[in-house]
Structure formats: structure tokens, C-alpha cells
Image (tube, rainbow, N blue to C red):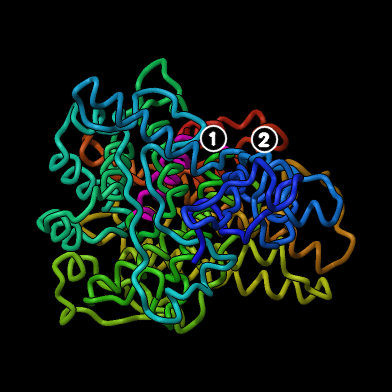
């Protein structure tokens, strides 16, 4: 058995021999060795042994292995550089300490957010190179929700002005009227269910509802709206936390709609792209399979809400692309068997017995709901953009044939929607799909005509000449239709309550027709007061 201070050695004879004067003796005359001095040891292995993963005896000043190998032995303790997690933990401790000192709750401070927002969130989302290949998909596991505290500025904005129930009521009476993507029943059920976490995504949705229903302030640019800036910050914080939520996508759609309506570019274009990417991450872009990242649906209402949210992404992607003059779509084209939205009233009430499922392949002359008309218009607009900017068409004849067919489809849908709007008790509900169809038609015809950004000259072929004439005539006819459309919108939006129901998505058609009349006024009929009147009517 080893002695605590080292192994006991056998008899040791001093330099004077066994009987020398310095040799100690036991009681029976036996001689004992003097205990060997305890050699000091380092608290950790030397650098070389640690690096080579060798056993180190830690003897100072040189370990046994380094002594035998006749190499330098270094016991310097190498303190690793602090990681981001270390810094975040320190910041969290600091925030907790400040909260205790101030006697308040731990919230994000008002004002600019620091470079790292980890003190307000704790991400529980594991890192994977491809989220679609994560084990959450393969084993149907639930993705943990990150813990995020809403920033103080957000809480203050929601607490000031109209209360949240009033904001929700105003939203469903205005924006929901033209872009019904959020389920009122599901939202009501969520509010009545005790929260298990901070519901930060729901808080962001309420803030975005308040933002999209707010009125512009004189003297303040909409891009400098404090509520808009707070919403963008909060969205970035939730994105960085790894939040995976349909509600978060819906909030981002409302931010994108606000940016589009207030012409905040390139932010609107970037936000639309973010929405499409995030929707693909959630899996709602595929109507055929159940999304796995946000789990299976429990009700028909929830499934329809996912369909509608994806349609909202598609619509905004197309409108923002045509508005920014950057016609590269970031979303996939709908397939013929993809479902169109069902009746809005039946969905809002959760009554699936009163619905008939229609699909993208449904005839344009067949009656569908207003939001389904909007989706049909967005499909045609996507076809137009693809025709002009991504399709590789081998011959001019084939290109013109496709253009004629697109014009025919758009014209049919325009006639159907216009007829439905004229007899509808709610014209404004069909104003948005009609405007998008007009946008698609003008976008289709403009490149084939003598437009303002091209040099006018004789056609290089008879086919091209015919196409140019028809395109120019079509622009005149449909621009006149847009003027009539704007007059109808004005006549049906006499009160502020009605005006609040008008979607910002109608603006592109007015702008496109106005551009055509501006070109005509400048190039063709500069002295014709009738053209000037039409231009002023649109403005």
C-alpha cells in the first residue's frame, strides 16, 4: 500500500555506510530510510502531454515523459478565448442584475438594440445544414419554441392607443377584407388558451396588425414610423432566435404589405423574398403533403389557413416584383391541382359543410369566391412575368402565340370579375383581384408596344407589326378600363370606413395606366385635353 506522501523505500544507507553517524535506528536496532521529499505537482497536465493525449505525472518543473524525451515541459494554463455563449451568458447576468437593482422585470430596453440580442432570447433550435433534413421531420418531433421576451418598446406601443381587441376588430374589418389569410377562429382560440410561453410571435402579429391599420403621420416618412422600425427589429430578433411559426410568417406578410403600400423599397422586395423562403422552410408551399416543421394540422380551418397564407406569399411576391421592376420571382408556380381558397364566410365561421373545393385548373368562367379570384389573377400575373423574363421561347411566332393566349385568358378573367363586381353588394371585395388582372394585362402588352422606354420605329416583320398594333390598341382599351375602375372605387369608398377596405395592391394598375397616359400625352396627343383628364382621374 502506498504511503500518502509517496512509496515507502527499503533501507537507505547514507554516504558514511550502514553504521554511519547519520543513519537513524529503530527501537530494535533496525534502520529506517528517511522519507523522500514530496515533489510538487502541477494542477494540470503539461501542454505537450495534453496535446498528444499522453498520461502526464505533472511533476514540477518537468514531467517524467518530457524529462525522458529531453524536451521543453510547459505547464502554462492556456485560457481559451471567450465564446459567444460566454459573452451572452455574461450579458444575461448583467441584465438580470440590472433588473434586480431597478426592481423591474427583465425586458429588452427601449431604443436601439445591441449587437447581440441574446439577452432577450434563448434559442432552443438546433443547428442543421438543411432544416428540411432535421430529425424533427424524420421522427415527427416537436420543435422547441425559443424563449423570447417582447422588447419594452413593443409592449409600450401595444399599450398605447387602441387596445389589442380593438386593433384585432379593426384589422378584420379592413385588411382581412382584401387579404383573408389569418383565421379569426384560430386567433380567438389562441387568445382563450392559457399561454405556455411568452407567445412572442403572437405579440409581433398584434403589433403588425396595429401597424398595417395605422394612418400616416404628416411630416413623417412611413419608413421612419417608430412602429414599423420596432416591428422590423422584433422580427429580426425572433428570426435569430430560431422561431418556427406560421404566425411569424403572417406577421411578416403584413410588414411586406405595409412596405409595398408605402413604397418602401428595396425593403418590400427583400421582405417578400424572406416570406417565400420562410414559407418553404415551414413546408406550406406544398399543398400535397402535410408540413412537418410546424406539425400536422388538427382542423380543416387550420389547413385552409395554411393554404391561404401561402397564397398570400405568392400574391405579394408577384406584386412586389412587378412594382420594383425586378421581375425575378422567388416563389414556385402553382400547379393545376393546387387548391384555391374556399368561401371566406364559411372559413371564418369554421363551417366546412358550406364549401366546395376549387382548384387552379378550375375554368375562369366558373364562379369562385373573391379571394379565389385574387389567387387566379396572381397565377396569370406570374405567367406573364415568366413569359417575358424567364421563358426561353425559340421563335418569334411561338412567343406571339403564347402572348395571344395569355391575353385571352386575362381578358376572360377581367370580364368575369368585372361583371361579378358590378352586381356584388361589396364592390371593394372584388376590386383587388380586378386590379391585379389589369396589372397583368398591361405588363403583358407593354413590352410589345411602342412604350416610353423604347425607341419607336417600324416593325421588322409583319407578325411583329400586327403584334405591336394589337398591343398598343390593347393598352389604350385596358387603360381606359382602369380609369373606369378607379371611378368605381371612388364611388364605393365615400366614407373613411370604406376607404380603409381598399387594398394597396390596386395601386400598380393605376400607376401602369397612368404611365401609359403620360406617354400618350407626351408623345402622341400632347394637346388633347381628354387624355389629360384621364390622367388626372387616375391620380
Secondary element under disc 1, as helix, strand or loop, is helix
Task: Name the residue at 65% across, 71% down.
Answer: 404
Residue 225, position in %: x, y?
40, 26
Q: Within the magenta stretch, is there residue 318?
A: no
At horizontal 37% and vertical 66% (from top left) the residue drawn is 143
Asked whether the residues under the numbered discs 2 and 1 touch, taking CB atoms below 8 Å apart as contact, a structural biologist would say yes
Q: Residue at x 47, y 32 (%)?
A: 539
Q: Is residue 83 left or right of residue 103?
A: right
- Percent coordinates x, y for residue 221 in the rendering: 45, 23
For disc 2, the marked residue is: 525
Q: Position of residue 382 (x, y in %)?
A: 57, 64
Q: CA distance from mark 2 to mark 1?
A: 9 Å
Query: How many other residues sit within 10 Å of disc 1, few (<14), some (14-19) or many (≥20)?
Result: few
Task: Give left or right: position of 146 versus 189.
Answer: right
Residues rendered magenta in the picture:
248-265
Sooner in the amino-acid sequence: mark 2 or mark 1: 2
Query: In the rendered image, which residue does mark 1 sit on?
Result: 530
**Residue 478 visible, this angle:** no
Q: Could you tell me if residue 378 is visible in this image? A: yes
Reply above or below: 477 against 1: above
Q: Which residue appears farthest toward the right when viewing the image? A: 460
| Figure label count | 2
- Mark 2 lies on a secondary structure that is loop
Q: Residues within 10 Å of mark 2 (few under 14, many from 20)?
A: some
Foreground residue among 78 and 491: 78
Amino acid at each position: 500500500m502506498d504511503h500518502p506522501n509517496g512509496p515507502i523505500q527499503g533501507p537507505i544507507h547514507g554516504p558514511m555506510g550502514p553504521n554511519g553517524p547519520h543513519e537513524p535506528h529503530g527501537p530494535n536496532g533496525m534502520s529506517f530510510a528517511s522519507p523522500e521529499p514530496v515533489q510538487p505537482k502541477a494542477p494540470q497536465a503539461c501542454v505537450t502531454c495534453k496535446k498528444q493525449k499522453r498520461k502526464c505525472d505533472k511533476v514540477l518543473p518537468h514531467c517524467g515523459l518530457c524529462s525522458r524525451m529531453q524536451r521543453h515541459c510547459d505547464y502554462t494554463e492556456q485560457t481559451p478565448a471567450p465564446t459567444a455563449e460566454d459573452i451572452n451568458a455574461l450579458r444575461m447576468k448583467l441584465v438580470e442584475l440590472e433588473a434586480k437593482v431597478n426592481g423591474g422585470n427583465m425586458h429588452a430596453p427601449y431604443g436601439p438594440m445591441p449587437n447581440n440580442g441574446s439577452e432577450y432570447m434563448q434559442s432552443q433550435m438546433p443547428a442543421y445544414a438543411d432544416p428540411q433534413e432535421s430529425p424533427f421531420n424524420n421522427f415527427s418531433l416537436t420543435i422547441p419554441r425559443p424563449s423570447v421576451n417582447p422588447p419594452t418598446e413593443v409592449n409600450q406601443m401595444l399599450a398605447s392607443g387602441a387596445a389589442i381587441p380593438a386593433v384585432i376588430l379593426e384589422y378584420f374589418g379592413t385588411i382581412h377584407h382584401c387579404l383573408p389569410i389569418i383565421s379569426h377562429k384560430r386567433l380567438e382560440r389562441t387568445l382563450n388558451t392559457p399561454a405556455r410561453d411568452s407567445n412572442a410571435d403572437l405579440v409581433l402579429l398584434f403589433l403588425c396588425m396595429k401597424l398595417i391599420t395605422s394612418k400616416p403621420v404628416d411630416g413623417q416618412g412611413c419608413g421612419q414610423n417608430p412602429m414599423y422600425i420596432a416591428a422590423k427589429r422584433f422580427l429580426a430578433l425572433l428570426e435569430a432566435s430560431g422561431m418556427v411559426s406560421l404566425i411569424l410568417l403572417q406577421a411578416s406578410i403584413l410588414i411586406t404589405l405595409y412596405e409595398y403600400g408605402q413604397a418602401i423599397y428595396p425593403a418590400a422586395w427583400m421582405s417578400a423574398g424572406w416570406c417565400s423562403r420562410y414559407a418553404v422552410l415551414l413546408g406550406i408551399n406544398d399543398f400535397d403533403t402535410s408540413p412537418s416543421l410546424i406539425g400536422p394540422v388538427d382542423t380543416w380551418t387550420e389547413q385552409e389557413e395554411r393554404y391561404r397564407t401561402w397564397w398570400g406569399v405568392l400574391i405579394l411576391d408577384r406584386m412586389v416584383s412587378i412594382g420594383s421592376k425586378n421581375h425575378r420571382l422567388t416563389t414556385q408556380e402553382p400547379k393545376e391541382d393546387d387548391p384555391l381558397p374556399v368561401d371566406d364566410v364559411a372559413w371564418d365561421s369554421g363551417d366546412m359543410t358550406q364549401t366546395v373545393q376549387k382548384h387552379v385548373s378550375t375554368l375562369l368562367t366558373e364562379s369562385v369566391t373573391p379571394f379565389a379570384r385574387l389567387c387566379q389573377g396572381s397565377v396569370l400575373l406570374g405567367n406573364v412575368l415568366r413569359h417575358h423574363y424567364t421563358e426561353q421561347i425559340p421563335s418569334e411566332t411561338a412567343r406571339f402565340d403564347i402572348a395571344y393566349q395569355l391575353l385571352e385568358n386575362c381578358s376572360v378573367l377581367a370580364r368575369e370579375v368585372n361583371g361579378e363586381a358590378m352586381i356584388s353588394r361589396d364592390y371593394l371585395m372584388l376590386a383587388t383581384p380586378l386590379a391585379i388582372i389589369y396589372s397583368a394585362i398591361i405588363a403583358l402588352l407593354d413590352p410589345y408596344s411602342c412604350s416610353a422606354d423604347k425607341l419607336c420605329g417600324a416593325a421588322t416583320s409583319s407578325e411583329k407589326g400586327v403584334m405591336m398594333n394589337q398591343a398598343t390598341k390593347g393598352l389604350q382599351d385596358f387603360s381606359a378600363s382602369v380609369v373606369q375602375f378607379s371611378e368605381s372605387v371612388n364611388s364605393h369608398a365615400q366614407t373613411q370606413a370604406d376607404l380603409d377596405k381598399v387594398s394597396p395592391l390596386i395601386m400598380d394598375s393605376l400607376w401602369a395606366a397612368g404611365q401609359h397616359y403620360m406617354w400618350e400625352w407626351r408623345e402622341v396627343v400632347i394637346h388633347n385635353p381628354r387624355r389629360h383628364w384621364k390622367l388626372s382621374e387616375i391620380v
